[in-house]
Each structure stands twice: as C-alpha cells, then as structure tokens.
Amino acid sequence: LDTSTRHGLEHDPAAPGDAVAGRWTLQSINGTPLPWVVLQSGANKIEVTADVLTATGTGSFTQVTTVRNTLNGLVTTETRSDAGIYTLNGNAVTFVFNGNGSSGTGVLNGNTLNVGVSGSAFIYRKQ
C-alpha cells in the first residue's frame, strides 16, 4: 500500500485543508465573549456557553455546541451536535451543515477563523 496517497490522490502535507484541520473553539459571537445570550425574556434565557468545531484535512467537520437554558430559576445544560463538509478557496472557508443544510462562510487568518452564519459573526481560535 502506497502511504503517500489518500483516496487515490497524491497527499501533499501542506494541502489547504490541513490549514483548517484541527480543533477550533468559539471565542465570541458578534463581538461578545461567551456565554452569549441567544434569547432572553425576563429571568428566562438561552445561552451558548461553548462551541467546538473539529475539522479533518479531508473536508469534513463536526460541531458540538453547549447551551444553558434558564427557565423559572431552573438551569439545565444541553449539548447539540452537527456535522458537515467544508471547502477552502484561498483563505475563504465554506461550511455546509448536515442538520439543516445551512451554510456559513468564513475567513481563515492563521489560528483565527471568522465565520458568518445567519447574519452573526462567530470567531473561533485554533487549539
């Protein structure tokens, strides 16, 4: 078996996907550090407390988001997962999510990834 090939294609260790590959943790949404309030009505609220995007060098990713719900003084935490594929064109990254088919476009700048989804700006840092 020739270990220099991946799926029949020659593997370049500096392939563009390798720049995206790794574990990215969400730092802020729309300039506000986590936790970020998604929805609030009085003392009741829904907040994003963590989000981790893990990308492979072959164009797939998984995402795990932790959400804190406060309802009538009762606080619960839930984890939401999704996955999908991404493409890299220069420093522009496009993510397509399996869960609902939505997409987000980001700009890769070293260890920072700025992704826009549904009108919000998500800043990730590579770990």
Image (cartoon, grey):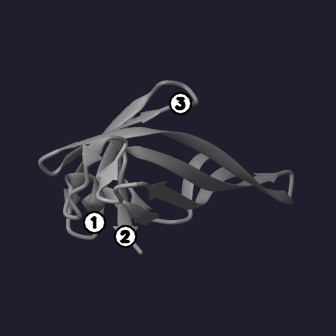
Q: In terms of secondary structure, where does tag 2 sit?
A: strand
Picture coordinates of residue 1, whole percent (x, y): 40, 54
Amino acid on which the number 1 mark rests in the picture: Thr
> Where is 89 relative to 64, above or below?
above
**What is the residue that sits farthest to the left in this orientation?**
90
Query: For this rendering, which residue is in front, 61 or 119?
Result: 61
Residue under label 2: 126
Q: Secondary structure at mark 1?
A: strand
Report if the CB atoms under discs 2 and 3 are less than 8 Å apart.
no
Residue under the point 32% across and 48% down: 115
Q: Residue at x 27, y 70 (%)?
A: 111
Tell me which label, 2 or 3, sits earlier in the chain.
Answer: 3
Residue 104 located left or right of residue 33: left
> Looking at the image, is mark 1 or mark 3 earlier in the sequence?
3
Neighbor class of circle 3 (other Cα within 10 Å; few <14, some 14-19, many 20+) is few
Compared across the picture, whether 61 is left or right of 5 comes to right
Q: Earlier in the sequence, mark 2 or mark 1?
A: 1
Residue 112's tag is 1
Residue 114 location, x and y as percent? 28, 55
User: Would you place residue 107 above or below residue 8 in this image?
Assistant: below
Q: Which residue is mark 3?
A: 98
Image location of residue 69, percent across then percent down: 75, 52
Q: Residue at x 47, y 48 (%)?
A: 61
Q: Residue furthest top?
A: 101
Closer-to-camera residue (67/30): 67
Residue 101 in view of the camera: yes
Do labels 2 and 1 touch, CB within 8 Å? yes
Of residues 110 and 29, the one drawn nearer to the viewer in this rendering: 110
